[in-house]
Image (tube, helix red, strand yellow):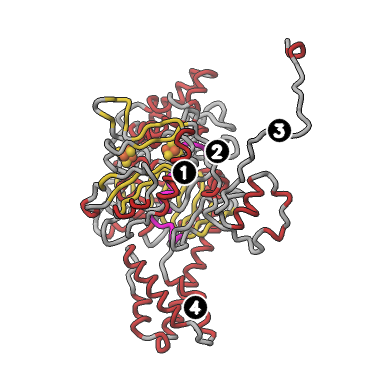
């Protein structure tokens, strides 16, 4: 009421008098395209760019988020090497790939900046090597999930963990120097010394999805990051429209990145309603091109040599080592084909890379997979083709503002279900299991990260369709995401989100293909639900109805568990 009386004029000088200069949007050492095109967009001057500045064929350079230092976090994690047990859990949960670990030859420390921290690596295979855990302080969003995940606390000071949040500003300069040095440390060999099949070892693999614009604490991006750590140098990604297509591919920068050899995921986005088919098209193209390349190898056997032809056609590519061998074979092939002026040789040269195994990952959220794109997804799963589907299930249309989807659980309130969803969520996993030849897993990285890793490795190795339904906490659930890992744990402990893997290969071994990876529900559903506003809000508006729905949801959880338990006994399922 007193606004007008208290208004006063602030004189604006005729010209700017500040001595502080605007920093350039990206550093000087950034590539030209990043400086001249993306930098302008970051400054809000994209309208001034001529059309000719953009790639004519629609392809777009990847790995460009690394140049856009957002400095969002007020606090960032600081490592305490004396406490750290090098478990890799913090790296596993980070939604932005801003905390990373490396093991390396101590000789590399000669060039390290002053104060760079490293300790002896705790792997028998890396005896004599050093280990470091590094935070990209200018890219970290301060979500605290890494600190929450850390299992180690100082016995003498319960407030001190092996990583702790500290103010970012005083750490910025040193953090930048340390990070730049960290990036020069090579990734350890991908085969030979250790197997990358557990959280501790996977922390050492470079992520090829980094610094995305997802919300701080996002529950989807850790799955994508994990997928790229494991297989990123040989995947093609079909991304449904939704949160993941926005943080994954919005201008000006892209988080999909490449490794030091220049290999990384090829990514494209399609609509809600056709993304699975879009990915199937990628898989069919891959299969056809590989088939033709193999045919050409056979046809050109006399020219390229029988030994090389045999290696190209028969190398077992089920392991990292096999894939590395095949890449060497392909390099040898390309060298031999140079200068051979026949149509077949030219065709084979252009298709040679298709002789290396590559995976198609079809990814998106529940709005796509359960609802708008379900018909196509079902068609693709039924096709029997070798594709991997990752559904990051936030149980609501997160990107468009929280509308209910068929994944929304009973008793939760969402737009279009504001009085509480009266019916249970669709059981996408069970629907896919009904085919009998689809690999299916239901995972929650915050509850059991080892099971998540197993599911990704099995899905990728399965020579047919695979589906991973991944619990993804989300701001739409109505709580601070620093608690998200607890919520994942509770979702599993209450039986709301049972963990399982269904692997048709086990049937051939006479074993039940369905494996339950979580224990029977041991807490009431309300322990989980009442911590999230999406369930709690109904108790404010209609408590009796809310109570009824919660009881019905509890009953549904128990029935679903009994069904899963029974199916896990059946060998011919
Ligand atoms: S605070 Fe969040 S974004 Fe920053 S390193 Fe930890 S998990 Fe990653
Ligand atoms: S979670 Fe804690 S103990 Fe494990 S690697 Fe990270 S800082 Fe070290």
Whole-percent x, y for residue 434 in the image: 40, 51
Quadrant, the N terminus: top right
The mark that comes first in sequence, 2 or 3, is: 3
- Inspect the magenta stretch and tell me whether residue 379 lies in it: no
Q: Which residue is mark 2?
A: 398
Few, some or many residues within 10 Å of mark 2 (<14, 14–19, 20+) = many
Whole-percent x, y for residue 221 in the image: 46, 44
Up-down: is 189 above or below 246? below
Up-down: is 82 above or below 309? above
Q: Residue at x 76, y 11 (%)?
A: 5
Q: CA distance from mark 1 to mark 2?
A: 33 Å
The boundaries of the magenta stretch are 215-235
Q: Which residue is mark 3?
A: 17
Q: Which residue is mark 1?
A: 176
Q: CA distance from mark 4 to mark 3?
A: 61 Å
Q: CA distance from mark 2 to mark 3?
A: 44 Å
The mark that comes first in sequence, 3 or 1, is: 3
Whole-percent x, y for residue 64 in the image: 54, 52
Q: Could you say which disc has been placed on residue 519 in the image?
A: none
Few, some or many residues within 10 Å of mark 1 (<14, 14–19, 20+) = some
Q: In the drawing, does residue 56 fall left or right of residue 403?
A: right
Q: Is residue 339 visible?
A: yes
Few, some or many residues within 10 Å of mark 4 (<14, 14–19, 20+) = many
Q: Could you say which disc has been placed on residue 349 in the image?
A: 4
The secondary structure that most of the magenta stretch takes on is helix
Q: Secondary structure at mark 2?
A: loop
Q: CA distance from mark 4 to mark 1?
A: 42 Å
Q: Residue at x 51, y 43 (%)?
A: 366
The reply to whether dot 4 and dot 1 touch (C-beta < 8 Å) is: no
């Amino acid at each position: 009421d007193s606004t007008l009386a208290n208004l006063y004029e602030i004189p604006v000088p005729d010209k700017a008098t500040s001595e502080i200069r605007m920093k350039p949007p990206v550093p000087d050492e950034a590539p030209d395209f990043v400086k001249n095109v993306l930098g302008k967009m970051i400054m809000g001057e994209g309208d001034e760019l001529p059309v000719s500045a953009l790639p004519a064929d629609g392809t777009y350079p990847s790995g460009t988020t690394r140049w856009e230092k957002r400095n969002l976090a007020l606090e960032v994690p600081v490592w305490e090497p004396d406490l750290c047990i090098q478990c890799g859990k913090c790296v596993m949960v980070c939604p932005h790939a801003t905390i990373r670990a490396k093991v390396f030859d101590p000789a590399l420390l000669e060039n390290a900046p002053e104060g760079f921290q490293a300790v002896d690596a705790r792997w028998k295979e890396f005896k004599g090597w050093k280990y470091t855990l590094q935070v990209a302080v200018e890219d970290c969003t301060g979500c605290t999930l890494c600190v929450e995940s850390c299992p180690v606390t100082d016995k003498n000071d319960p407030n001190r963990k092996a990583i702790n949040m500290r103010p970012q500003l005083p750490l910025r300069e040193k953090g930048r120097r340390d990070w730049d040095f960290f990036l020069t440390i090579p990734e350890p060999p991908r085969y030979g010394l250790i197997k990358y099949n557990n959280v501790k070892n996977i922390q050492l693999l470079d992520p090829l999805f980094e610094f995305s614009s997802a919300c701080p604490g996002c529950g989807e991006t850790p799955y994508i990051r994990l997928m790229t750590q494991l297989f990123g140098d040989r995947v093609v990604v079909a991304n449904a429209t939704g949160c993941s297509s926005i943080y994954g591919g919005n201008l000006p920068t892209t988080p999909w990145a490449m490794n030091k050899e220049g290999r990384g995921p090829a990514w494209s986005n399609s609509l809600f309603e056709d993304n699975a088919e879009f990915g199937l098209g990628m898989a069919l193209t891959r299969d056809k091109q590989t088939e033709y390349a193999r045919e050409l190898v056979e046809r050109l056997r006399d020219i390229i040599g029988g030994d090389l032809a045999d290696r190209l056609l028969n190398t077992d590519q089920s392991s990292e080592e096999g894939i590395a061998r095949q890449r060497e074979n392909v390099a040898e092939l390309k060298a031999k084909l140079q200068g051979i002026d026949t149509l077949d040789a030219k065709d084979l040269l252009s298709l040679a890379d298709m002789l290396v195994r590559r995976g198609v990952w079809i990814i998106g959220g529940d709005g796509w997979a359960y609802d708008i794109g379900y018909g196509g997804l079902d068609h693709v799963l039924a096709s029997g083709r070798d594709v991997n589907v990752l559904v990051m299930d936030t149980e609501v249309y997160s990107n468009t503002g929280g509308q209910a989807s068929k994944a929304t659980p009973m008793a939760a309130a969402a737009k279009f279900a504001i009085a509480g969803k009266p019916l249970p969520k669709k059981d996408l996993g069970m629907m896919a299991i009904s085919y009998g030849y689809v690999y299916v897993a239901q995972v929650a990285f915050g509850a059991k990260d080892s099971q998540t890793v197993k599911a990704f490795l099995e899905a990728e190795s399965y020579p047919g369709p695979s589906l991973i339904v991944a619990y993804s906490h989300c701001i739409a659930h109505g709580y601070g995401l620093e608690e998200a890992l607890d919520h994942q744990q509770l979702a599993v402990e209450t039986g709301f989100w049972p963990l399982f893997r269904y692997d048709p290969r086990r049937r051939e071994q006479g074993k039940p293909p369905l494996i339950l990876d979580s224990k029977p529900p041991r807490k009431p559903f309300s322990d989980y639900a009442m911590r999230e506003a999406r369930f709690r809000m109904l108790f404010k508006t209609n408590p009796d109805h809310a109570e009824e729905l919660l009881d019905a949801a509890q009953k549904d959880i128990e029935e679903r568990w009994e069904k899963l338990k029974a199916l896990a006994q059946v060998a011919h399922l």
